[in-house]
Image (cartoon, grey):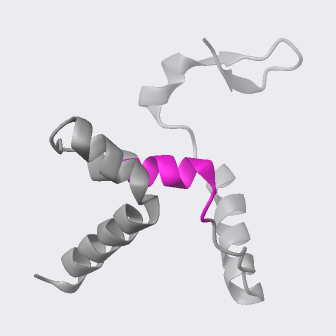
C-alpha cells in the first residue's frame, strides 16, 4: 500500500471507531455494503460533532489566495457556459438563470 491508501484506511478505521455503537448496530441489521464507510464519513462531517479547531490562514497564503480570487474575474466566461447566463434586469450584469 502506498502512503495515500494507508492514510485513507487509517481515516476510515478512525471514523468507524468514533461512530462506535451506530456502526455496530447497522452492521448487525444488514451486511456491510459498498459506500457505508463513505456515508459514515459524510454524516460525521455534516454533523460537526468531531470538528477540529479553526486554523488561521497565514498572511502569505491568504494574500496569494485572495489574488487568485481577484484574478479569476479577468478571465472571460467560457462559451459553453454562455447559454446558462442571462442579463440582469438592473443593468446587464450576468447571473445564472433557472
How many marks are shown on the rendered structure? Answer: 0
Q: Nearer the viewer, residue 52 or 87?
A: 52
Residue in view at x 30 percent, y 70 percent:
13
Residue in view at x 75 percent, y 80 percent:
56
- Tell me: residue 48, above or below residue 67: above
Residue in view at x 41 percent, y 54 percent:
21
- Tell me: residue 41, above or below residue 95: below
Q: In the figure, residue 12 lies in which quadrant?
A: bottom left
47 within the magenta span: yes
The x and y percentages for residue 82 are: 52, 24
Q: Nearer the viewer, residue 1 or 10?
A: 10
Q: Is residue 51 visible?
A: yes
Task: Please name the predominant secondary structure of the magenta segment in the image.
Answer: helix
- Tell me: residue 21, above or below residue 29: below
Residue in view at x 78 percent, y 26 percent:
93
Quadrant that contains the C terminus: top right
* Left/right of residue 23 with respect to residue 88 in the rendered view: left
Quadrant that contains the N terminus: bottom left
* Left/right of residue 17 with respect to residue 84 in the rendered view: left
The x and y percentages for residue 59 are: 77, 86
Q: Is residue 38 visible?
A: no
The x and y percentages for residue 65 are: 66, 71
Which residue lies most toward the right here? 90
The x and y percentages for residue 86 are: 65, 15
Q: Magenta stretch: give its range.
A: 40-50
* Left/right of residue 65 with respect to residue 82 in the rendered view: right
Q: Nearer the viewer, residue 56 or 47?
A: 47
Amino acid at each position: 500500500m502506498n502512503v495515500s491508501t494507508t492514510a485513507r484506511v487509517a481515516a476510515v478505521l478512525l471514523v468507524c471507531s468514533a461512530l462506535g455503537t451506530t456502526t455496530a448496530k447497522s452492521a448487525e441489521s444488514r451486511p456491510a455494503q459498498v459506500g457505508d464507510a463513505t456515508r459514515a464519513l459524510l454524516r460525521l462531517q455534516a454533523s460537526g460533532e468531531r470538528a477540529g479547531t479553526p486554523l488561521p490562514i497565514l498572511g502569505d497564503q491568504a494574500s496569494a489566495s485572495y489574488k487568485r480570487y481577484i484574478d479569476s474575474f479577468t478571465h472571460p466566461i467560457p462559451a459553453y457556459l454562455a447559454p446558462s447566463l442571462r442579463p440582469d434586469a438592473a443593468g446587464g450584469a450576468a447571473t445564472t438563470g433557472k
